Amino acid sequence: MESKPIVAALGVELSEIDLRSPLGDDDRAELRRLFATRHLLVFPRQELDFEDQVRAVAALGPVLPGGPEWVSNVREHGLVPEGRLLFHSDFIFTPEPCLGLSLYATEIPDDGSPTVFASTVRAARELPPDLRSRVSGRSALNIFDLTDQRGDVRFHEDALGPATPLSPRHAHPILMRHPTTGQQVLTVNEMQTDYIVDMDREASEATLSSLRDVLYAPDNTYTHRWAVGDLVIWDNIAIQHGRPSPPRHAPRTLRRVTMANRDVFDLVPGFTEARAALRRPTGATRPSVAEGP
């Protein structure tokens, strides 16, 4: 197996490895090391079925059970089929965000229909001292509407009203320790973060804007242009993801496998009883929410 960094802020590309075969102990240990330090792994030109993808992800952490999910504009019940996606981390609006995500490309438009990634670890490290002082010890409220399939809107408590099983919310420390690596991460994002708790709304909005300037600076991001056969696995807490709007009439399909200790059904009290309000694929184990790359 050979590896090379992708950009300074994040990511590594892995070659000379065939994920159709079980990983040896040395390769598994090296992938775990790279995942903990570079946070995003790119495996180009793989030929993988669903079980191969699950096995590769399981080498890095716990995989949620169930069949494959599809980020697609041509498959029935495909997740977020159209439109731009603002930067976010999946399930940051719950007490336990997903640990990691993976996508395997099966149909891709000619332009590569990119996904963009941003490092929350480097952003936390690069905060100017005055901004760090302003947010140190503070939390921000993250909120989501599980019935909303759009990805280009920022969610607000004022619009969604009191918390329900379909509009969950959770306040995380703005500067939080990663549960696995212990690295400091920046938890605010442009889709789900509404406001900084116990801060004047005008000051909160100005502070969030300054944090986003650091987080989404060009030298803190990586744009991955997909090719059929690409597998990308990333740490959902150390990395945020988003995308520009894909081409409307070109097939785009990526198979998703999620790394997490608990499902959204467990993390959002009452969600199981309310899930009938969601448009869900038959037999799915998780909701078709508008999170996805």
Image (cartoon, helix red, strand yellow):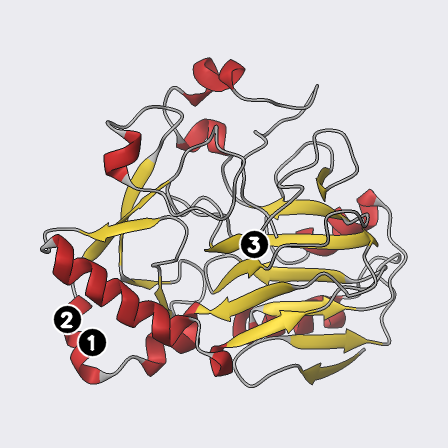
**Residues at circles 2 and 1 in contact by the CB criterion of under 8 Å:** yes
> Which quadrant would residue 121 be assigned to in this image?
bottom left
Circle count: 3
Question: Which tag, 3 or 2, sits closer to the chain's start?
Answer: 3
* Pair 3/2: label in front: 2
Please tell me which residue is depicted at 66% across the width and 77% down the height of the picture: 12
Query: Percent x, y for residue 116?
Result: 58, 66
Q: Which residue is mark 3?
A: 100
Quadrant of the frame with the N terminus: bottom right
Tag 1 secondary structure = helix
Q: Which mark is residue 134?
A: 2
> Which quadrant would residue 133 be assigned to in this image?
bottom left
Query: 199 above or below 54?
Result: below
Query: Percent x, y for residue 88?
Result: 46, 54
Q: Which mark is residue 131?
A: 1
Q: Label 3 amino acid?
A: Gly
Q: For the residues marked 2 and 1, what is the alpha-carbon distance in whole angstroms?
A: 5 Å
Q: For the residues marked 3 and 2, what is the alpha-carbon distance in whole angstroms?
A: 29 Å
Query: Percent x, y for residue 82?
Result: 65, 44
Say which of 221 and 84 sits in front.
84
Question: Which tag, 3 or 1, sits closer to the chain's start?
Answer: 3
Tag 3 secondary structure = strand
